Amino acid sequence: MTATPERPRSGPKRRRPSYLVRQDEVKRLQTQLQVLQRQLKRLQARPRSARAQILDVVGANNSLRDVIHGQQLAVAGARSMLAGMQERQTGSPLCRHIHLPRECGS
């Protein structure tokens, strides 16, 4: 038989107060924030790759294409309305029948 040294029991482990736990968490998060800010500065200082620049240009082109398409649709809608009005008012304005309301006094 091997003898294992027995530890004296000092009772159940006490729970840490929540304010100390929060202080530790705040310190840990602040150090993590500093690390992330350093990484961000390093990445922003780095020159952008050609691929990223191309992707930016492609995104801008897509946005412009969408805007132009919307404007073209608006112009087509206006033309359609004008064409509809022209169809209803066919013929010369001089030959059209004129509808005048009756006068109330006579």
Image: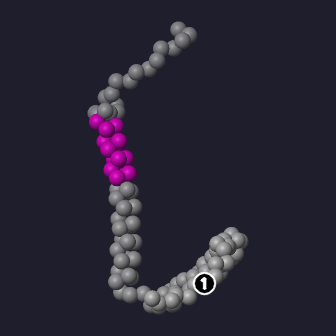
Q: Residue furthest front?
A: 1
- Where is residue 55? Give x, y as percent: 36, 77
- Where is residue 18? Give x, y as percent: 68, 69
Characterize the local packing of mark 1: few (<14), some (14-19) or many (20 or more) Cα atoms within 10 angstroms: few
76 is within the stretch colored magenta = yes
- Where is residue 57? Give x, y as percent: 37, 77
Q: Which residue matches tag 1?
A: 7
Instruction: Name above or below for residue 3 compared with residue 97.
Output: below
Helix, strand or loop for disc 1: loop
Residue shown at 38%/24% (left/top)? Answer: 98
Q: Splitting the image into 4 quarters, where does residue 82 fall? A: top left
Instruction: Name above or below for residue 96 compared with residue 80.
Output: above
In the image, the segment drawn in magenta is 73-87
Determine if residue 96 is in view: yes
Taking depth in this image into account, of 4 and 85 the one nearest to the observer is 4
Taking depth in this image into account, of 7 and 55 the one nearest to the observer is 7
Left or right for 47, reference 61? right
If the image is split into quadrants, where does the N terminus sit?
bottom left
101 is within the stretch colored magenta = no
Residue shown at 39%/72% (left/top)? Answer: 60
Instruction: Name above or below for residue 62 compared with residue 4.
Output: above
Q: Splitting the image into 4 quarters, where does residue 81 fall? A: top left
Protein image colouring: one colour
Residue shown at 44%/20% (left/top)? Answer: 100
- Where is residue 54? Give x, y as percent: 35, 80
Residue shown at 33%/27% (left/top)? Answer: 96
* Magenta-drawn stretch, dominant element (helix, strand or loop): helix
Q: How many marks?
A: 1
Determine if residue 30 is in view: no
